Amino acid sequence: MAKRAAPEVNAGSMADIAFLLLIFFLVTTTMEKDSGINRKLPPIQDDDQEDVIIKQKNIFTVLINGKDQMLVEDELMQIKDLRAAAVEFLDNGGDGSCTYCKGRRNPKSSDNPDKAIISLKNERETSYETYISVQNELVGAYNELRNRRAQEQFGTSFLEMQKNYKDVQWIGNKTKLKERIDQIKLEYPMKLSEVQ
Amino acid sequence: MSKFKKKKDGGLPAINTASLPDIVFMLLFFFMVATVMRDSSLMIENRLPKADQVEKLEKKNLVMYIYVGKPSQGYKAKYGTEARIQLNDKFAEVGDIAAFIAAERAEKREEEIPALITSLKVDKDANMGLIGDIKQELRKVNALKINYAAIKGGISN
């Protein structure tokens, strides 16, 4: 019997099969990278702990009411003005102990960034969208100050430093970078309290 | 001169499609590697708010998700139109959060537990009352690291 060559397999439908699989994976998977505003909740306090007395001038109250209006230090304010107001409050340096502050040293406002506390209050009817916008502006105020301080001291922004620290491929001394990040965090500590 | 005469039998020559499967497979592998499986299907409306100070969440396996929003179209009749909590694949009450966190923690190794982050994926139309309750519940079980999920973009007033 004559030897016959094996017949060629028709691969025309291979593309169809591959497309089918591709579409399946496109539909069932997500590519979204999760991002958001990181916050830390305060732990539940024991009852026997005594209240720390904080001077009124060291607290910056932000209240969002059920109609999504914002009261800052008992005055109505628009969200776009909030960041500047928060920066002014945090950077005030009223008692002169903060050497790197550039604020107006108004004795009626906060003593130093370590003592300054932002208190964010909301009502049950407040919409989440507004709340996040306000949170964002307040975090933005802290980042602005930290960036400025990092720029002065190390010639790079704080966010850049944090990004480098997380970057696996970054070449440089990470221990030193961590120290610098911690130093900036200490100089402008994020004291943002969310009360019910 | 018939030697140089071109054959003209009309019609375009067929394009060789033999490498098409290779191209499609390449795309397929890209998507298989670059994406993760959806872990739960959403039964609620979930349009995240926008913010510009967002940080990326690394280590996806250390994130617990709590979804909040109005039940989507198919579930309106049964679950109403008020914002609800969704944990894994079902609607839940505020009281179920403690059990959910405990279950998530049980799956993880002990040294990973302090690094767990709770991501709150809340619809932008939800109101803060429910979120406040969730936060209170998270404080009770000592799950203090939270992340308000938001999309990077200009803020809305």
Image (cartoon, rainbow, N blue to C red):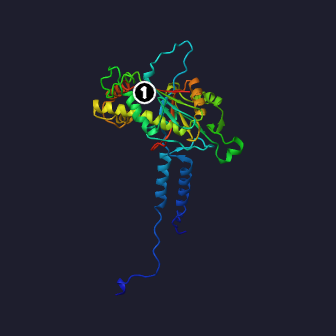
Q: Quadrant of the N terminus of chain A?
A: bottom right
Of the pair A181 and A171, the residue shown nearer to us: A181
Would residue A21 appear left or right of A157 to someone viewing this image? right
Q: Name the residue located 54 percent from the left edge and 18 percent from the top edge.
A: A45
Which residue is the site of mark 1? Answer: A190
| Disc 1 crowd, CA 10 A, few/some/many (<14, 14-19, 20+) | many
Would residue B96 appear left or right of A81 to someone viewing this image? right
Give the number of marks. Answer: 1
Residue B68 in the image, given as x and y percentages of width and height: 60, 38
The amino acid marked with disc number 1 is Met
Q: Name the residue located 47 percent from the left edge and 63 percent from the top edge.
A: B18
Q: Quadrant of the C terminus of chain A?
A: top right
Residue A30 in the image, given as x and y percentages of width and height: 53, 46
Q: Callout 1: helix, strand or loop?
A: loop
Q: Quadrant of residue B4?
A: bottom left
Q: Is residue A52 above or below residue B113?
A: above
Residue A58 in the image, given as x and y percentages of width and height: 43, 22
Q: Is residue A52 above or below residue A194?
A: above
Q: Name the residue located 47 percent from the left edge and 50 percent from the top edge.
A: B30
Of the pair B30 and B9, the residue shown nearer to us: B30
Q: Quadrant of residue B132?
A: top right
Q: Chain of mark 1?
A: A
Residue B46 in the image, given as x and y percentages of width and height: 57, 43
Would residue A22 appear left or right of A181 to someone viewing this image? right
Q: Is residue B25 visible?
A: yes
Of the pair A46 and B114, the residue shown nearer to us: A46
